[in-house]
Amino acid sequence: MGAGIGGLTAALALQSIGAQVEVYEQARQLGDVGAGLGLSPSSMRVLDRLGVGDEIRRVAAPLDGLWFRQPDGTVVGQMNTNSAGSQMALYRPDLIATLTAALGGGVLHTGHRCISFSQGERVARVVFDNGVIAEADVVVAADGIHSVLQRHVVQPRPPVFSNKVAYRGIIPADRLPDLPRRDAVMWNGQEKYFLTYALRSGELRNFVGFVPADQQMRESWSAPGDPAVLAAEFAGWDPQLEALLQQVDTTFRWGLYDRDPLPRWTRGRLTLLGDAAHAMLPHMGQGGNQAIEDGMALAVLIRGLDAGDVPDALIRYEDLRRSRTAMIQQGSRANGQLLDSGEANMAQRPSDDYDIEAEAEARR
């Protein structure tokens, strides 16, 4: 359930072990929504093993380092983000398109909104608003922070608003030739910060500006923002940043929410994955990466099992993933506090050498 990064990666990983997979997505089409994201070496290891790593590299851009600047442009630190040699920056729609193409035709079903879920000892059933009924040995709820299936696993809790809004978007990189092509740049001030890096082999420039919010807004990739309002938030900052903001034609506002770590992810033949399981703030750049790890772990742990053994395997999946993702959820909140204080160069990041496939194999 869900054709985002986690749902599609899980589907591809499950296909790789011989499972028959169907992906249901409530949107009628997978639009050009989202912006850039960083893929960790851990994620690239998974994507290589699923056979799409080379295509990802073709449409991505290397991300070697991160430069920290004060609002006036003074450099205060630098971080090597690519010690393992495979940190990549990618336009989210390019990742979605690559994963979808790898699945092959007839697997993805758009325009299917879940209205009912039930399960018995032998099968789980999902009913959609168009009358379609799907039955499966396992249902993977990868339907995001506003998951409709989460309530069938755990008592729902409202998402936690961070009192921050992000303005996101992309611009042609040739408008900003002086910015580095292989490094990210972050300007960090009190309670405001701005990040930019290259996408599509340097053809595009991703940007995201984080600012305080005086009211809550629903988490969304597609709520329109005003470029003039964004520019005003960073008026008087580094002239290079102001020059970038002058090139912004379109931006989208994204309310920043997460959830407290959930006490459980699995009930019977239903399990949660990605933001449905562990919605997190973006301050470690790990939301998509953890969803990719989830997908590989799930496939490894149910590989070769009979349908009757699936519920126990889902518990092992949850046991493996819940502690790591909870740590990163909490670390992302802590990084947000450091960013608010102007100490971005003190932010933490997870290890580059994590091998989720090996970790899952050890739990079989």
Image (cartoon, rainbow, N blue to C red):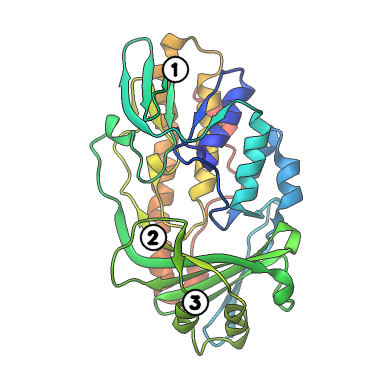
Callout 3 environment at 10 Å: few (<14), some (14 to 19), or many (20+)? many
Judged by depth in the image, the label closer to the viewer, 1 or 2, is: 1
Q: Quadrant of the N terminus?
A: top left
As drawn, 78 above or below 4: below
Nearer-N-terminus badge (1/2): 1
Residue type, mark 2 in image = Leu
As drawn, 54 above or below 103: below
Asked if marks 1 and 2 touch (Cβ < 8 Å), the reply is no
Residue at 63%, 60% in the rendered image = 81
Is residue 306 left or right of 260 when viewed as pictured?
right
- Residue labelled with disc 1: 136
Judged by depth in the image, the label closer to the viewer, 3 or 2, is: 2
Label at residue 46: none
Label at residue 256: 2
Asked if marks 1 and 3 touch (Cβ < 8 Å), the reply is no
Residue at 52%, 65% in the rendered image = 168
SS under mark 1: strand
Residue 340 visible (yes or no): yes
Q: Quadrant of residue 138?
A: top left
Q: Quadrant of residue 273?
A: top left
Is residue 254 left or right of 362 when viewed as pictured?
left
As drawn, 52 above or below 241: above
As drawn, 303 above or below 256: above
- Image coordinates for residue 331, horizontal then vertical, percent: 42, 56
Judged by depth in the image, the label closer to the viewer, 1 or 3, is: 1
- Image coordinates for residue 284, horizontal then vertical, percent: 49, 57
Nearer-N-terminus badge (3/2): 3
Residue type, mark 3 in image = Asn
- Image coordinates for residue 142, horizontal then vertical, percent: 44, 36
- Residue labelled with disc 3: 188
